[in-house]
Amino acid sequence: MARETSPRKIENPPPPRQVKRPATTDELVERLLNARNSNEIAAVIGLPPITGLSGPKIAY
Protein backbone atom coordinates (compact mmCIF):
# COMPACT_ATOMS: atom_id res chain seq x y z
CA MET A 1 0.00 0.00 0.00
CA ALA A 2 1.12 3.49 -0.74
CA ARG A 3 1.80 5.78 2.14
CA GLU A 4 -0.25 8.93 2.33
CA THR A 5 1.82 12.07 1.84
CA SER A 6 -0.56 14.63 3.35
CA PRO A 7 -0.43 15.09 7.12
CA ARG A 8 -3.32 13.60 9.03
CA LYS A 9 -5.79 16.06 10.53
CA ILE A 10 -6.34 15.63 14.22
CA GLU A 11 -9.84 16.62 15.27
CA ASN A 12 -10.23 18.21 18.65
CA PRO A 13 -12.95 16.61 20.78
CA PRO A 14 -16.00 18.81 21.37
CA PRO A 15 -16.01 20.74 24.64
CA PRO A 16 -17.65 18.84 27.51
CA ARG A 17 -21.35 19.54 27.96
CA GLN A 18 -22.41 21.32 31.08
CA VAL A 19 -24.39 19.00 33.30
CA LYS A 20 -27.36 20.52 35.05
CA ARG A 21 -27.50 19.78 38.71
CA PRO A 22 -30.64 17.89 39.65
CA ALA A 23 -33.35 20.09 41.06
CA THR A 24 -34.36 19.56 44.63
CA THR A 25 -37.89 18.53 45.50
CA ASP A 26 -38.62 22.00 46.86
CA GLU A 27 -37.52 23.64 43.59
CA LEU A 28 -39.67 21.27 41.53
CA VAL A 29 -42.70 21.90 43.73
CA GLU A 30 -42.19 25.65 43.44
CA ARG A 31 -41.92 25.46 39.65
CA LEU A 32 -45.04 23.26 39.44
CA LEU A 33 -46.99 25.68 41.64
CA ASN A 34 -46.02 28.56 39.36
CA ALA A 35 -47.00 26.71 36.16
CA ARG A 36 -50.10 28.24 34.62
CA ASN A 37 -51.06 25.65 32.00
CA SER A 38 -50.48 22.05 30.98
CA ASN A 39 -47.56 22.84 28.69
CA GLU A 40 -45.69 24.63 31.47
CA ILE A 41 -46.27 21.60 33.70
CA ALA A 42 -44.94 19.36 30.93
CA ALA A 43 -41.84 21.55 30.59
CA VAL A 44 -41.13 21.32 34.33
CA ILE A 45 -41.47 17.54 34.26
CA GLY A 46 -39.39 17.24 31.08
CA LEU A 47 -42.13 16.09 28.69
CA PRO A 48 -42.78 17.49 25.20
CA PRO A 49 -45.60 20.05 24.90
CA ILE A 50 -49.11 18.74 24.30
CA THR A 51 -50.47 19.88 20.95
CA GLY A 52 -53.42 19.01 18.78
CA LEU A 53 -55.39 20.27 15.80
CA SER A 54 -57.20 22.84 17.91
CA GLY A 55 -54.18 23.92 19.97
CA PRO A 56 -52.73 22.86 23.32
CA LYS A 57 -54.60 20.16 25.20
CA ILE A 58 -55.10 19.95 28.94
CA ALA A 59 -54.31 16.39 29.93
CA TYR A 60 -52.61 16.61 33.32
Image: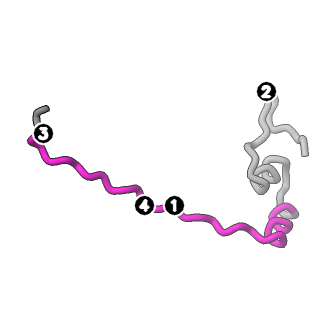
The residue that mark 3 highlights is 4
Residue 53 is labelled as: 2
* CA distance separating discs 2 and 3: 58 Å
The residue that mark 4 highlights is 15
Q: In what element is the residue under mark 1? A: loop
The residue that mark 1 highlights is 17
> Three-letter amino acid code at disc 2?
Leu
* Residue range (magenta): 4-32
Residue lying at 85% horizontally and 55% vertically, measured from the top left: 36
Magenta stretch: helix, strand or loop mostly: loop
* CA distance separating discs 1 and 4: 6 Å
Of the pair 3 and 26, the residue shown nearer to us: 3
Judge from the rendering whether residue 47 lies leftward or rightward of residue 60; answer left or right.
left
Which numbered mark, 3 or 4, is in the foreground of this view? 3
Which of marks 3 and 1 precedes in the sequence? 3
Residue 41 % position (x, y): 82, 53
Question: Label 1 crowding class (10 Å Cα cut-off): few <14, some 14-19, many 20+?
Answer: few
Which numbered mark, 1 or 3, is in the foreground of this view? 3
Which numbered mark, 4 or 2, is in the foreground of this view? 4
* CA distance separating discs 2 and 1: 36 Å
Of the pair 10 and 4, the residue shown nearer to us: 4
Residue 58 % position (x, y): 89, 41
Residue lying at 84% horizontally and 63% vertically, measured from the top left: 34
Question: Label 4 crowding class (10 Å Cα cut-off): few <14, some 14-19, many 20+?
Answer: few
